[in-house]
Image (cartoon, rainbow, N blue to C red):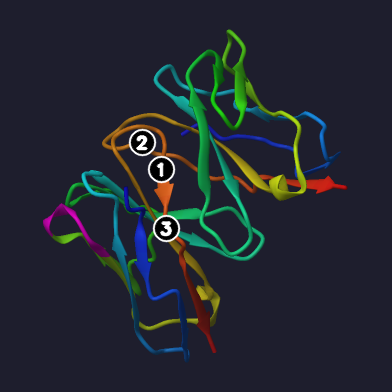
Amino acid sequence: EAGVAQSPRYKIIEKRQSVAFWCNPISGHATLYWYQQILGQGPKLLIQFQNNGVVDDSQLPKDRFSAERLKGVDSTLKIQPAKLEDSAVYLCASSLGAPAQYFGPGTRLTVL
Amino acid sequence: LAKTTQPVSMDSYEGQEVNITCSHNNIATNDYITWYQQFPSQGPRFIIQGYKTKVTNEVASLFIPADRKSSTLSLPRVSLSDTAVYYCLVGGNTGGFKTIFGAGTRLFVKA
């Protein structure tokens, strides 16, 4: 069974630029999560989808971050414009309605 | 959502059994307990989940007392490759399981 796929793996941008991350969850997993993990900290949930509906986006900085999950499968997370403090690893995870979440390798974003 | 408290770090030696305890005093009736392992530059990896009593798989055991206010992850005979951060999460199903990651426990296994 293929795992959660994410791209790109690394991205370097300058502040005020835009960036987008893509996630393809495990086939059949209805729940998709995006996390932000700053070095030395645990992952912080940004947004949670159940199929193509948003369950929780309370910690998503909506003035600059947006996410969508069209057709309840793939998802994209966008940052526009990026700030220095957005430098982090962005993790995507999916689950099949059970507690266990399966994570992708993450995208390491560096904002200069 | 129930918050969790874990030791910041632990040291062990190869071949020893390691027990990491997590406190979750305000766990709700429908909350499950899950544990994850994370190596540097990788996403967290699911290890084990449980609701009550004891759960065992090929990697670890999870002990949950009757009051469910804590849980203990037991790693038998650790090796150097078990050096990682271990996260305890508690969450219930409200349109997909919602969970909060804490800072985790950094386990250092020495030769």
The image's mark for residue B83 is none
The residue carrying mark 3 is A104
| Residue plotted at (56% across, 21% down) | B56
Distance of mark 1 from mark 2, alpha carbons?
9 Å
Magenta-highlighted residues:
A71-75
The residue carrying mark 2 is B97
User: Where in the figure is residue A97, as x and y percent of width and height?
Assistant: 29, 34
The residue carrying mark 1 is A101
Q: Would residue A60 be counted in the magenta stretch?
A: no
Q: Is residue A49 left or right of residue B103?
A: left
Q: Amino acid at mark 2?
A: Phe
User: Where in the figure is residue B18, as x and y percent of width and height?
Assistant: 76, 31
Q: Residues within 10 Å of mark 1 (few under 14, many from 20)?
A: many
| Residue plotted at (58% across, 10% down) | B67
Callout 2 secondary element: loop
User: Where in the figure is residue A109, as x and y percent of width and height?
Assistant: 49, 77
Callout 1 secondary element: loop
